Amino acid sequence: MGRLKKLLTLVLSAALLLTINVSVFGAELNANEKKILAQFNEEPFSSNLDKKYINQFENYFSQDNVTIEKSQADSFIEYFAKAIMEYRKSGGKGPIFSQSLESFQNFQYAGSCVGIYLQYDSNTNSFYGVDANGYIVIDSQKIIKDTGDSSSSNSAGQKSWGVSIEMIFAGVILLIFLGIVINAKKLIVKLRKHSAKNYDDEEDEMEVANRRTRRARLQTFSYTNFKQIVKYFYVPVLMCIVVIGVVYIGWKPYTSLMMSIKEGFIQNLTINTYSEEKKNFDATPLIKDKTISGEKVSWPKFTEPYGVIKCDKIKLNAPMYMGDSDYVLSGKVKDKVENDYDDEFVSKLDDTFKGAAGTYLGSSIPGDGKTILVGAHDTTFFKPLEKVKKGMVMDVTTSYARYKYKVKDIRIYDADEVDEAYDLHSDKETLVLYTCYPFGKLNGDKTKRMFVYLDKTFGPSIDKEVTK
């Protein structure tokens, strides 16, 4: 009887271990996930889908808890193809998720097949794909443009050039006030001219009384003067109505989508955050092998710390988090969620977190053999880059391995030309660090960005092939 218990225990342990190994692949990709990624490189996807989205889908499939079945992959491809066709019918211009309600719905259906839920954030006018736990996995925005002082940035880290209703109302009031001031000035000048006239000495009291009566009449508003003042009220209002009408006609192709947003079909985005305590990477092993199995790599979630980058020569020491939104770069994660979650969840967030270096979701992580795009503020973690030089070596320690990168180039780009500064299509592993330029808080509106390019000189490559 004792032997039978031991045998059953061994069988159950083996079954449990097998279940864990089969259901958790780490950073590996199964055949169905590879099928989706391969389909993205064919029509109708290849000419309409930006490379950054393909990278983001691959990063999502690489997460520990994501395993796509054949039926899920087939349904995803079917709905995604329909969404692309609707996108083409509506003009095929602008953000791929925002052309029409029909296109958006098909993208939603496709995403739900693989556990991704498409949402719209009206605060940043952006579309995001979130997983079942609320973590961002698909980011429609380009890399953050404002990596300087974030006080004048919106929640996505980009400068907001939009005009709010409050600003329009304030503008109308200002125009009305200026109209009154200008008209009042004309009346004052007119009154002064009449008051300055020289009158002959009055011969009697009756003449004096008549003159005072005439002066009193001049100081009252006539019907003509009243019309002049009123026009400074209705002219700005009419002009605003005309401008709003022109803008409405220009945005008519987006009417169906905007109405759906207004009616609550698309909700404001609630971003989830990684609530685990701060990680310590000192115990990360030094792996001398050329490769590391993907099942040993835990792909980081949005806002999760997964490494640290150091360079002793310039005193660079920056924690690396997944995502380059302002929540990561400026430490605003707790501020974002404090009204959206219960006190127990918020209490788990680190009160001392003041920002980090953020990795763009559309790029990759060390060891994956692709472009790694990391940004931080020039007044905080990337301030030491002011002293960086070619040939310097930087150490990157992740939760799974240690790496070394060597600076090969340093370039400066205008803020509106940063897309030319990096290549997400590259199959060569390159670490790209970027920040605002010139450095320092007293340099006003920073219209340039500094990029530092580093080649990998040491560290294992991640093998994503499924071995089980």
Image (cartoon, grey):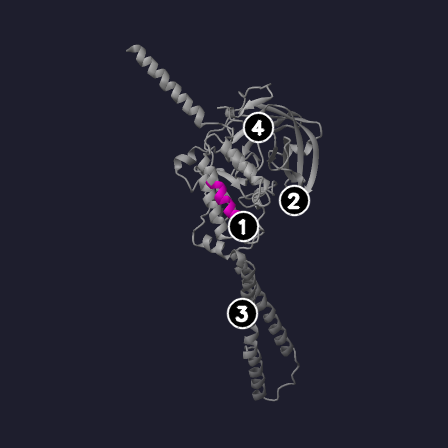
Q: CA distance from mark 4 to mark 2?
A: 26 Å
Q: Which numbered disc flags the more N-terminal residue, 4 or 1?
A: 1
**Residue 237 covered by magenta stretch:** no
Q: For the residue labelled by badge 4, is the local secondary structure a helix, a strand or a loop?
A: strand
**10 Å neighbourhood of mark 1: few (<14), some, or many (≥20)?**
many
Instruction: Provide the secondary structure element on which disc 3 rests.
Output: helix
Kindly indicate the quadrant of the structure image that contains residue 314.
top right
**Viewer-nearest of discs 2 and 1:** 1
Q: Amino acid at mark 4?
A: Val
* Cβ–Cβ under 8 Å for marks 2 and 1: no
Q: Which residue is mark 1?
A: 87
CA gap between label 4 and label 1 equals 40 Å
| Amino acid on which the number 2 mark rests in the picture | Ala
**Residue 14 location in percent, x, y?**
39, 19
Calculate the distance from the C-alpha at mark 2 to the C-alpha at mark 1. Answer: 29 Å
Residue matched to label 4: 308
- Picture residue at 48% right of the left edge, 27% below the top: 25
x, y percent for residue 457: 65, 24
> How many angstroms separate mark 3 from mark 2 (CA)?
41 Å
**Image disc number at residue 415:** 2
Q: Position of residue 310 (x, y in %)?
A: 61, 27
- What's the amino acid at mark 1? Tyr
User: In the displayed structure, would residue 139 be above or below residue 88?
Assistant: above
**Residue named by callout 3:** 234
From this viewpoint, which residue is outermost toward the left?
1
Q: Is residue 336 visible?
A: no
Report how far apart the C-alphas of labels 4 and 3 lie in the structure. 60 Å
Instruction: Assess disc 3: are there few (<14), some (14-19) or many (≥20) residues with their C-alpha within 10 Å of its C-alpha.
Output: few
Which stretch did the figure color magenta?
Answer: 75-85
